[in-house]
Amino acid sequence: MTLPASGAISLSQVNTELGLTASTTVSLGASNVRTLAGVASGLIALSNLYGKSNITEKGYFGGGNTTSNLSEIDGITFATDAAFNPSATLAVARTSSAGVQSGSL
């Protein structure tokens, strides 16, 4: 879930975005909150969290003939076709502090 782009943001929403339980004690100065907000040091406000998401999407595309049916990228193992398929779906790995999710576009 992405935090709201405007309006009120609660610390329970921030916790949920970070993969924590909503009732976990949290501080705006905590390193995981600062990382999410993109504010390494100095003053920080809830408004720094507008529109922020803890999910980073990475897209990978493999083409050409392969001699193996497995590929590993960034420590994630993907099953692949034996040969290039131009109509294949794009594999997407979404990583967050809560774990790894996979899907296709």
Image (tube, helix red, strand yellow):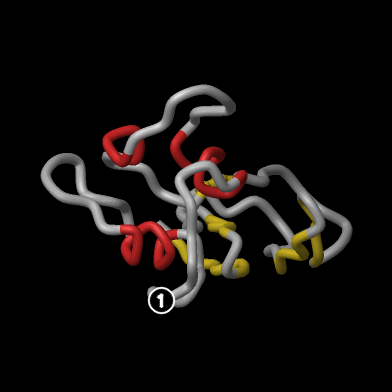
**Residue, far left:** 7
Dot 1: what SS? loop
Q: Residue furthest right?
A: 67
Q: Is residue 2 left or right of residue 80?
A: left
Which residue is painted at 81% across and 57% down in the image?
75
Task: Indicate whether 8 appears above or below 21.
Answer: above
**Horizontal and vertical percent for residue 60?**
61, 46
Label 1 neighbourhood size at 10 Å, few (<14), some (14-19), many (20+)? few
Viewer-proximal residue, 13 or 57?
13
Is residue 68 shown left or right of residue 78?
right
Residue identified by numbered label 1 = 23
Q: Is residue 17 above or below residue 27?
A: below
Residue 55 placement (x, y as % from top left): 48, 53
Q: Quadrant of the C terminus?
A: bottom left
Left or right: residue 75 compared with residue 98: right
Q: Position of residue 86 (x, y in %)?
A: 51, 48
Q: Amino acid at mark 1?
A: Ser
Q: Residue at x 27, y 35 (%)?
A: 47
Which residue is rendered at x = 21% and y = 49% of the image? 4
Closer to us: 55 or 59: 55
Give the residue at x 70% y 63%.
80
Q: How many marks?
A: 1
87 and 8: which is toward the camera: 8
**Quarter of the image with the N terminus in it:** bottom left
